Each structure stands twice: as C-alpha cells, then as structure tokens.
Amino acid sequence: MSSGSTTQRTISYQSAGVDIEAGDRAVEALKHSVRKTTRPEVVGGIGGFAGLFALDTEKYKKPLLASSTDGVGTKLVIAQKLGIHDTVGIDLVAMVVDDLVVCGAEPLFLLDYVATGQVVPEKIAEIVGGIADGCRLAGCSLIGGEIAEHPGVMKADDYDISATGVGVVEADELLGPERVKPGDVAIAMRASGVHSNGFSLVREALFNVGDMELDTVIPEFASADFPQKTLGQELLTPTHIYAKDCLELAKECDVHAFAHITGGGIAGNLVRSLPEGLQIEVDRGTWTPNPVFDVVQRVGGIGREEMERTFNMGIGMVAIVAPDQVDRSLAVLTARHVESWTIGEVVEGDAGVRLSGEYASAG
C-alpha cells in the first residue's frame, strides 16, 4: 500500500456559487435609484446594517405604526420568461403599501428582499429600480434590504422578491369596519389589470390549457398606446398603486374604510371592511371587467364563481364613504385620473358581501 502524497482541492465561497463581489457591485448599481426615494425623515444612507427613519412627532400626536409584508407571487415567472425585470418591483410596492393605506396609514418606508440563484448586478439593479419607482409613486422611502444568493437551491436565472413596509396613522383617524354605517356607499377604483394575484390560475388557463404564447397579439387588449398588445405585455402590466389616491380621498372626504382587492376577490376582501350586522350587495352591472379576465375565463373554461374568488375582476380598491360624500369622492378620484364608480350601499344584514346581476357589456 503506497503512502504517496495527496493534493487537497482548494474551495471558496465563490466556487460554491456565491459571488460576494457581484453582490457588492449590485448594491452599488442600485444606490442611485434608492436615493431618489429618500424622504426628509430618513437618517443615513443605504448600506448600513439597519435603515433609520425619524418619525415626525410634530405632525403625529398619537401615532399608530402600521406594517405589512408581501411578495409578488408567480407573476415573477412571466417576468423571468420575458426577461423584463423593471416592473415587478412596482407590483411589490403596491401589494405592501396599499394594504397599509387601508387603515388610513401613510406609507413611510420599505425594506426589500431579493433572493436569486446567481447575482447578476445589472438584473438586480433593474429589479430594485422597479421597487424604487414604486416607492416614488407611493411617496415612501426605500431605506434598506437584502440581496441573497442561493446557488443549489434556486436556478441561476430564478429570483423571488418580497418587502415589508411601515406606515403611520393618527389614532383618532384610523379607518376600518368600526366606522362603517348603514347608508354608506362603496366606491370602486379601476384595476390596471390582473395586478399580482391569481397568476397560478392565469398560467394554468392560458399556457397549459390554452397553449398560448407570451408574444401572441390579443385584439381585445389593443389600446391607443398599444395597438398590437401582446399577452405578455398585458400580464406584466404593473399593479396600480392607490396609496396617494386613498390618502388624498381621506383628506378631502369623509371616508370610513377602504378595501384592497387582492387574493380572495371583491367579496373576500370587501367583507373585511364591514362590521358584523352590516352587508353590501355589489351590483356587477355597474362595470365591465378588464378584457384580460374574459380571455382567462374563456380560454381556461373557468366558472364565474372561481374567477370572482381568485381575481379582482377590474376593481383594485374600494372606498366606503358617507352617503353625502359620494359626488365629492368621485370628483377627487377623477381629478387624480382614477376611474371610479359606485357599486353598492351598506345595509343592515348578516350576509356580508354578495355580488348580484350581470357584468355590463363592453362598449
């Protein structure tokens, strides 16, 4: 038996799949976008161990902090297939801040988390650039986050994103079910598209059942801006961010509650803004869902009940306002270029939310 020498192979973190220098380059590449989201209350800059934010105690006398965390779900699959990474960050911000604003809270700051199989600085910069764009639309600051490289767990091109946001509301200005009264009116705000919920069903219906391609031009999606709009373009339409619209509405009108229409659909989310003993019947005849929902339903052969408990069906946010505030509320939203309309009235009863009638026909 020979006792000859052996050569030990040298390994490193990089050879194991984690490139620390690429991570550092990614952080440098996104700093410019992040700086554009800075509010006066932000203390220090990005790159520290924690983000710092000085709460304005002159503005808020009895502040309540609100927090929310969320992700974008499988909409990311569409972005990754198309190689378009600068819009899903807007979706992410919308999912977080529009949950905050439901209670009347002003979104203050956001922290993001990006996990990927391989850090490509340019791609990370696109993703976080979209998050920064969303923060500017929402009026909040992106004060920190994390970029995690997970080789062997995620494929090199895969990534997932999530974020946590914090907002503030005066205790005596808190909105919610306890403020809602019989006679109040529900006002819907138009969704920009599918938003960020239900994409597992979208993908099953359109790609597995319908065998459609992302580059297929869909005539129903045509608009002045996109006369030849593809399926991929429609599905990647960013989620509308309602935060500033809702804050302005609450400032100008007597708003009692909001409902962010996400997973669970209109009924599943609107009921969360109603107290026990009150109900609302939503009249489908007051609007026409966005064309994308008709395409998903028709191609996938999906029943209306399943559609309505999965998708927003064209309504992204609902405001419940005092009956004498309806005209004023609609005027405020119109001035902010938000399509809005009344969908129902709050009455006594135990049924919660019920959709009735048939959707209005397009045109």
Image (cartoon, rainbow, N blue to C red):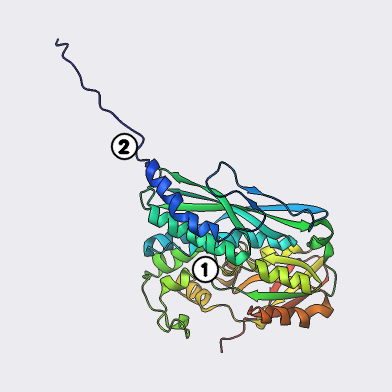
| Front residue (pair 25, 213) | 25
**Residue 203 image-quadrant placement:** bottom left
> Is 51 placed left or right of 115 in the picture?
right
| Front residue (pair 138, 318) | 138
**362 over 12 or under it: above or below:** below
Neighbour tally class for label 2: few under 14, some 14-19, many 20 plus, Cα within 10 Å: few
Which-is-in-front pick, marks 2 and 1?
2
Marks 2 and 1, how far apart at CA? 37 Å
Which residue shows up at 30% across the image and 31% down it?
Answer: 11
Say what secondary structure mark 2 lies in. loop
| Front residue (pair 317, 47) | 47
> Is 334 placed left or right of 120 in the picture?
right
Q: Where's the C terminus, which quadrant?
A: bottom right
Residue type at numbered disc 2: Ser
> Is 242 placed left or right of 133 in the picture?
right
Which residue shows up at 67% across the image and 63% down it?
Answer: 268
Residue type at numbered disc 1: Pro
Q: Earlier in the sequence, mark 2 or mark 1?
A: 2
Residue designated by label 1:
238
Which residue shows up at 55% across the image and 43% down it?
Answer: 48
Which of the numbered marks, if any, corresponds to residue 15?
Answer: 2
